[in-house]
Image (spheres, grey):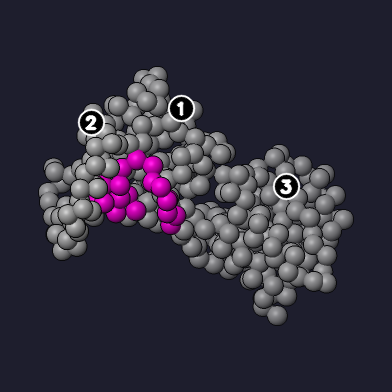
Amino acid sequence: MPGVAEKTRKKIQACARKFGYRPDPALSALADYRRRTRPATAYTQVAYVTSYPMKDDPAWGFLTDGLLRGARKRGLEFGYDVISYWLPEGGCTLRQASSILFNRGIKGLLIAPLPVENGHLDITWKYFCSVAIGTSMISPLIDYAAFDHHEAMQVVVEKLRGKGYSRIGLFMLHHRGARLRYTSFDAYAGDQQRQPPEPALPPLLLDEFSSEEFWRWFDLHKPDAIITDADSKILDILKERGLSAPKHVGIACSSRFIRENTGIASVTQDLQVIGAAAVDRLHTNLLRSAYGVPAHYHGTLLHGHWAEGSTLRKRR
């Protein structure tokens, strides 16, 4: 239970082991069923907590809307009311926000993606069962649900190889490898090293768009296909020289949201599915009374779906 001293918690657990206590799966299932079927007025609240620089920050709205919508829908299935909570509300410190949430009777937290790389939150974790969404938080390490960017990049590369592309370049704009724990880049680099005798193509990683740098890289390495996160800009860049996809070069994106730039070949990720998966894990933790920071954390990785688009040639 939250609020119980760690010493007391361990003492109770030791007594349970001594007397051979084992939870009854049937009773746990019954409790879960009752939670699912009780009236909405009895819903337990769990909090979707954000730490963006300002409340309802529009810069992150595209992310929160999908994740929160999926979390709320799945939460209702389990009997939870998922509410949005901005941690700095009223100028609170993280410890003060923890006390407010605890005093409201909130036992479960969904930690929204953090606005920084290698993020840290100093919440009073022992009060809550918690699950992070995404991989931007590295301290403390708690259970998380995230899109599998490594597998998505592998799928894109496999599709390109299957269509006969051999010189596959990587052009990343606003490169945020640390937020994804470098999984996309690692998958691409691994493929490049497994393709002898073709020399590896160095990726073009930019924080700000530069047409000059792009064309310098393009002319030097002559890729026949480009994997990019700059899917909103890449087709316009090619037009500068009268080029187009797939006639002159293949274009693919390793990850895009379902309804964005649907003409570009890509692996798509569904934010609502990720939000729902986070609630699934949180529900499990609440049933187990898994409060605090776990000794061994678990990750749930969601796979995307290939969208063919019109920017790649037909399979050879």
Q: Amino acid at mark 2?
A: Arg
Q: Earlier in the sequence, mark 3 or mark 2?
A: 2
Element type at mark 3: strand
User: Which residue is found at the position 82% from the left and 55% from the top?
Assistant: 218
Please give the residue where the numbered disc 1 appears in the rendered image. Answer: 54
Answer few, some or many: residues within 10 Å of disc 3's Cα (few below 14, many 20 plus, some between 14 and 19).
Answer: some
Query: Label 2 near label 1: C-beta < 8 Å?
Result: no
Element type at mark 2: loop
Tell me the number on the disc at residue 104.
2
Query: Label 3 near label 1: C-beta < 8 Å?
Result: no
Cα–Cα gap, marks 1 and 2: 23 Å
Q: Earlier in the sequence, mark 1 or mark 3?
A: 1
Quadrant of the image occupied by residue 213: top right
Answer few, some or many: residues within 10 Å of disc 1's Cα (few below 14, many 20 plus, some between 14 and 19).
Answer: few
Tell me the number on the disc at residue 205.
3
Query: Is residue 296 magenta-colored?
Result: yes
User: Which residue is found at the position 70% from the left and 40% from the top?
Assistant: 207
Report x, y in % for residue 43: 18, 44
- Mark nearer the viewer, 3 or 2: 2
Quadrant the C terminus occupies: bottom right
Answer few, some or many: residues within 10 Å of disc 2's Cα (few below 14, many 20 plus, some between 14 and 19).
Answer: few
Element type at mark 1: loop
Question: Which region is colored magenta?
Answer: 281-300
